[in-house]
Structures are given as structure tokens and as C-alpha cells.
Amino acid sequence: MKIRVLSYNIHKGFDLWGNWTLEDMRRALLDTGADIMMLQEVVGENKKHQRFYAQSRADHQKTERQFEYLADTVWPHHSYGKNAVFPDSHHGNAILSKYPILSTHNLDISTNTYESRGVLHAKINLIPAGRPLHLVTTHLNLLEGGRILQSRQLIDWLRKEVPDDEPVILAGDFNDWPQSLTTLFEEFLGLRECFKVQRGKHARTYPAIFPRLMLDRIYYRGLRLSSAETFSGPPWISLSDHLPLFAEFEIE
């Protein structure tokens, strides 16, 4: 059995220049064939965005929550982890799935008052013999000290909550400018990173128009990696400030 996973920081539905792109993004994502989407910077509510939906929403779209809007009828199962909360808006991480979600949990890993961060965990059951697949997505701090603290908290939490023999996909925007976190995840969680395995280095995903920085990752264990690619070029360079990552796995 194959499973296709996409990880994407959607920049709250705006491109690098502040243009609203959510409708175009939705069409592009529908064409990817992903079974699972693990998204960051997803708006759960923002009253200022209502005018964009009024202008562009299809008649059958009755929601202004971005994860529901993107899910449409293709990913009927979804989970949202609210992290950054403001008087008239909130945003966080989301997991969209073609397969039923058995359980979900959002872990607060904020280390300061300026960056509200979380880890969203969802379990889906598509593994033979009834073993669950654990999906984990996050968006870590910009500052390295905070990222290290968050990574250790994430490691401790996963070691406690997820049995060692159960498969895991950990994906998101790790903001890992110095590329120091992969060693931690390999050593303490037994995770491997898709692009590191396939190409010997992490994928460049930021900025979308001219990607130089390796900020986004898809880590895994208990699965067989078939392929990994970065979606680049049109339309992706004009949909968000990041490029999406895509990986296909074989489930044994």
C-alpha cells in the first residue's frame, strides 16, 4: 500500500507580496494526489479575511476556516491545532486526511510570549494488523535557542506517547537554519529525513521565488520511502512564501 504525504507552510493563504492566493492554492493542492496534507500557518478564523471569501468562494464552500476550505471533499477528515490566538483571529497547524482520524492532540510548545507554537498529533488507522500511523506536524521558533528547547520537548513527548514499533511521519516548518535538528531526531527518535535519505541533503524551500534555505522537512520511521520531491516553479512560486514538500511511502 502506498501513501502520499504533502507538507506545506501556506503563509495564511498569501504569497510573498501579500496577495490572497487561497483559491489558487486549493486548486493546486487538489492536483497533487496527496493522501495526507500536513499544513502550517493555517488560519482558523480571521474576520479581516471574510471579504476574500466573499469574492472568491465557490457556491458549495460554506466555511471560512482555511483547513476546511482546502479540504473540500477530497480530504474529509481533518484536525486543527490552534496556537496563535488574537482578539479577532487565530492560526496554527492542520492535518487533512483521506483516511479516518482515530484521535488527535495539540501540544503547546511555546517558549516565549512572541511566538505561539504547537505540535499537532493525529492517529490514522491504515496499517495492516490494525497498527496506527502517527502523523505529527509542527512549526518551530525562529530563534535557535527556542527551537532546541522545542525539539527536546517534542522528542520527550513522542517517546512517551508513541510506541517505538509504530510508524511515524513528522513534518513541518522547522526553521532549522543551521541544520542541527536532524541529528537529534535520528538519535533519539530513530527518524530519517526524506530528502537527506534520497539526495544527501535537505530540500531548499524558502523563499518560494528563489529557494535558498532548507527550513521544511518530512521525517519518518517504520515506512519505506519511495520518492520525495519539492514542488517548484509555477504555480507554487506564487502561492505562499514556502514551497511544499511531497513524499510517497510504502506501508508494509
Image (cartoon, rainbow, N blue to C red):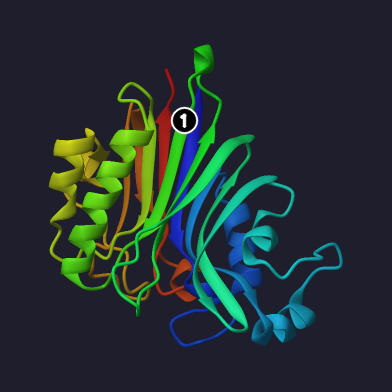
Rendered location of residue 173, percent (x, y) = 35, 61
Question: Horizontally, is 34 left or right of 61 in the view?
Answer: left
Relative height, residue 69 to residue 239 (above, below): above
Q: What number of labels is visible?
A: 1
Q: Nearer the viewer, residue 187 or 145?
A: 145
Asked if residue 244 shows in the view, the reply is yes
Pick the quarter of the image with the C terminus. top left
Position of 33 with respect to 121 (left or right) is right
- Residue at coordinates 41% horizontally, 74% vertically from top-left? 241
For label 1, the SS is strand
Note whether 80 is above or below 19 in the view shown.
above
Q: Amino acid at mark 1?
A: Leu
Left or right: 187 with respect to 34?
left
Q: Which residue appears at 82% of the width and 65% of the height?
A: 62
- Measuring from the top left, give residue 244's x and y in whole percent: 42, 59
Query: Where, by quadrant of the figure, is residue 42 drawn?
Result: bottom right
- Residue projecting furthest to the right: 59
Q: Nearer the viewer, residue 187 or 71?
A: 187
Residue position for label 1? 133
Determine the residue positioned at 39% across, 56% down: 138
Is residue 220 in sight in this rendering? no
- Give the percent coordinates (x, y) of residue 123: 51, 35
Tell me the crowding category of disc 1: few under 14, some 14 to 19, or many 20 or more residues within 10 angstroms, Cα based: many
Q: Quadrant of residue 148?
A: bottom left
Determine whether, in the image, residue 184 is placed left or right of residue 32: left
Q: Nearer the viewer, residue 28 or 172?
A: 172
Q: Measured from the top left, where is residue 132 in percent x and y?
A: 49, 26
Seen in the picture, residue 29 relative to 126 is either above or below; the reply is: below
